[in-house]
Amino acid sequence: MINRAVKVQSFDAKDPFAGLALVTKPVPKAEAGHVVVQITLRPVLLIDLFHIRHGANGFFTPGAEGFGIVHDIGEGVKTVKKGQRVVPFLALDPRNVEGSWQQYICIKEELLWAVPDSISDEVAAQFVINPWTLYGMLTDLKVPKGEYLLQTAAGSGLGRQVIQLAKHWGIKTINVVRRVEQKEELKALGADEVICTNEEEDVATRVKEITGGKLAYGAIDAVAGTLTKQVVASVRDGGQVFVFGFLGGYDITVGVGDLFRGVRLTGWNLYNAITSAERRKLFTTGVSKLLEAKIIVPLVAETYDLADFQLAIKKSTEVSGGGKVLLSS
């Protein structure tokens, strides 16, 4: 039995993906209290590409999440059985450098979620990173029904799921995108308002017009950089802005006057949000219900074999429409 794995074998900042290679290694043994999972699907995520580009974990196997089948169980394991469909919570341990871009992993029993029959393999493979992040941020923001939530990078997979969940919860959304063709796409999905920065629309001015001067109740920002200044200026006095990405750079620009208005600017990180067992249970239960009811619908762009990881990486940087590229094995 072969355990194929994609591994960072070397690192060159000028061409970081060139250091990736498909290798084989032994199938891990099921230690006491552990489960060996055969990973069959895993998405190519921005966080995976970030770690590769920056050599964040040294020589490692990428992959923050995935879906698989229980291959073997160790002594004392009682909650799962061989052949069961499961999601391993690799993202719960940020120190884990043995990610999902391999065929077999060994993980603690308590870090597995049994997938119900009502959720497909493709959706289960995307159960954690995006849905948990948006569920956590919207839960923490506590935007009242009928008020506006502002978000950047709204055309992304996560951004589209934000629109879906906000609509379900009765929250209005103002969505910032870069491509004009995304306006109608997002409105068809349920977006209330869409602002396109490439049309030279000033975000703060448009938000003020849309809300009749009230401004957005709160905001989530995946871009950072100079756009954050406009986001913070678009939020009500005493409002909250969560920055959870850095597509626009690692530095943030903020107007001092907006800080004097009491607008709170905070980083939001999934790892920090799920440190307690109670919080993890809340996320697991809440997100699974939303997926089962198809309120949140993760999309798939294309699927590649694990051996074609370079093609999958390339495709993941090109696709639009919010779908994720999957690697299968």
Image: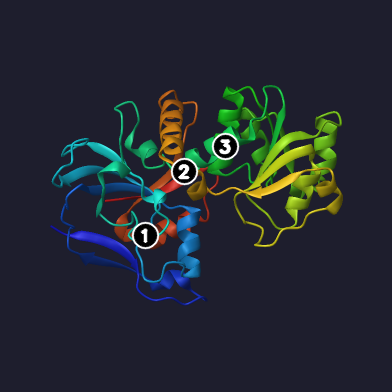
* Residue 10 can be seen, yes or no: yes
Q: Alpha carbon of mark 1 to alpha carbon of mark 3: how far?
A: 25 Å
Q: CA distance from mark 2 to mark 1?
A: 30 Å
The residue located at (44%, 23%) in the rendering is 293
Sequence-first disc among 1 and 3: 3
Q: Counting other residues with Cα less than 10 Å from the Cα at mark 1, is it few (<14), some (14-19), or many (20 or more)?
A: many
Seen in the image, is 171 located left or right of residue 118?
A: right
Residue closer to the observer: 249 or 107: 107
Regarding residue 178, the answer to whether it shows in the image is no
Q: Name the element at disc 1.
A: helix
Q: Secondary structure at mark 3?
A: helix
Dot 2: what SS?
loop
Mark 3: amino acid: Arg
Estimate the x, y position of residue 92 in percent, counting from the top left: 40, 48
Q: Which mark is residue 274?
A: 2
Q: How many numbered marks, from 0 up?
A: 3
Disc ID at residue 28: none
Across and down, in percent, residue 34 comes to 21, 48
- Which amino acid, by three-letter code, is at mark 2? Ile
Image depth: mark 1 or mark 3 in front: 3
Residue closer to the observer: 98 or 315: 98
Q: Check the image and report above or below for 105 versus 139.
A: below
In this picture, is 11 found above or below 137? below
Q: What residue is pinned by disc 3? A: 160
Q: What residue did someone put label 1 on?
A: 309
Q: Position of residue 143 (x, y in %)?
A: 67, 29
The amino acid type found where label 1 is placed reads Phe
Q: Which quadrant of the structure image shows residue 9?
A: bottom left
